[in-house]
Image (cartoon, grey):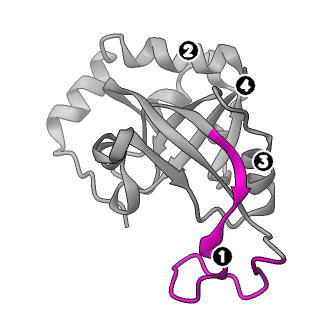
């Protein structure tokens, strides 16, 4: 089994949207970066992924999803009405791929990016590299377990104070 991190903007498709989807499952389409696409293509059925809300206030790890269908052509690339249209792609030349994911868990608490940055066990994580913008990245088994443990633990005192001081904004832009 491999582990991943998948990013979505909550204003586009939040983990709560995934929870409301039929069978709590959706296609993970619209990836338009070759490296992230290659990571999608490496995913296997049963792999687990940290679901991460990017472009949120605060950006945070919010749950876990499972790969339930391996990579197949992303048809949104050849749909001119899609936000993810790519005129270089076609059914005969499917440049882009997608997978299907299913909700496993919404974390009891979100783990904000700044808290993740402060965890020594996560220091090598791709997400935490300055300038990292990939929407799909591999995660080591140890990093995955660390994030799961954080999600089920009480927040650090400083994080709890910051959460109370500032109303949560779940809209992504």
In the rendered image, which quarter is residue 151 located in?
Answer: top left
Q: CA distance from mark 1 to mark 2?
A: 35 Å
Q: CA distance from mark 2 to mark 3?
A: 25 Å
Cβ atoms under marks 1 and 2 closer than 8 Å: no
Q: Position of residue 39 (x, y in %)?
A: 76, 45
Please report whichever mark, 1 or 4, sits nearer to the chain's N-terminal start: 4
- Residue neighbourhood size for the residue with mark 2, other residues' Cα within 10 Å, grouped as few (<14), some (14–19), many (≥20): some
Residue, disc 2: 146
Q: CA distance from mark 2 to mark 4?
A: 15 Å
Does the magenta-highlighted stretch encompass residue 73? yes
Please report whichever mark, 2 or 4, sits nearer to the chain's N-terminal start: 4
In this image, 34 relative to 10: left or right? right
In the rendered image, which quarter is residue 105 located in?
Answer: top left
Q: Position of residue 127 (x, y in %)?
A: 63, 40
Q: Range of the magenta residues?
A: 69-92
Q: CA distance from mark 1 to mark 3?
A: 16 Å
- Residue neighbourhood size for the residue with mark 3, other residues' Cα within 10 Å, grouped as few (<14), some (14–19), many (≥20): some
Q: Which mark is residue 41?
A: 3
From the image, state whether disc 2 or disc 4 is nearer to you: 4
Q: Secondary structure at mark 3?
A: helix
Q: Which mark is residue 2?
A: 4
Q: Secondary structure at mark 1?
A: helix
Does the magenta-highlighted stretch encompass residue 30? no
The residue closer to the viewer here, 6 or 171, is 6
Q: Main secondary structure of the magenta part?
A: loop
Q: Which mark is residue 148?
A: none
Please report whichever mark, 2 or 3, sits nearer to the chain's N-terminal start: 3
Please report whichever mark, 4 or 3, sits nearer to the chain's N-terminal start: 4
In this image, 160 relative to 106: left or right? left
């Amino acid at each position: 089994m491999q582990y991943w991190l998948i990013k979505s903007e909550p204003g586009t498709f939040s983990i709560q949207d995934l929870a409301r989807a039929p069978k709590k499952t959706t296609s993970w389409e619209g990836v338009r970066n070759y490296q992230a696409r290659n990571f999608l293509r490496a995913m296997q059925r049963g792999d687990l992924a940290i679901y991460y809300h990017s472009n949120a206030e605060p950006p945070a790890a919010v749950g876990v999803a499972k790969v339930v269908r391996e990579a197949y052509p992303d048809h949104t690339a050849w749909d001119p009405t899609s936000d993810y249209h790519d005129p270089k792609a076609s059914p005969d030349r499917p440049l882009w791929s997608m997978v299907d994911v299913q909700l496993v868990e919404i974390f009891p608490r979100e783990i904000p990016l700044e808290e993740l940055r402060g965890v020594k066990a996560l220091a090598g994580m791709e997400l935490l590299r300055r300038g990292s913008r990939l929407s799909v990245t591999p995660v080591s088994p140890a990093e995955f377990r660390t994030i799961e443990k954080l999600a089920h633990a009480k927040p650090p005192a400083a994080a709890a104070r910051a959460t109370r001081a500032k109303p949560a904004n779940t809209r992504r832009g």
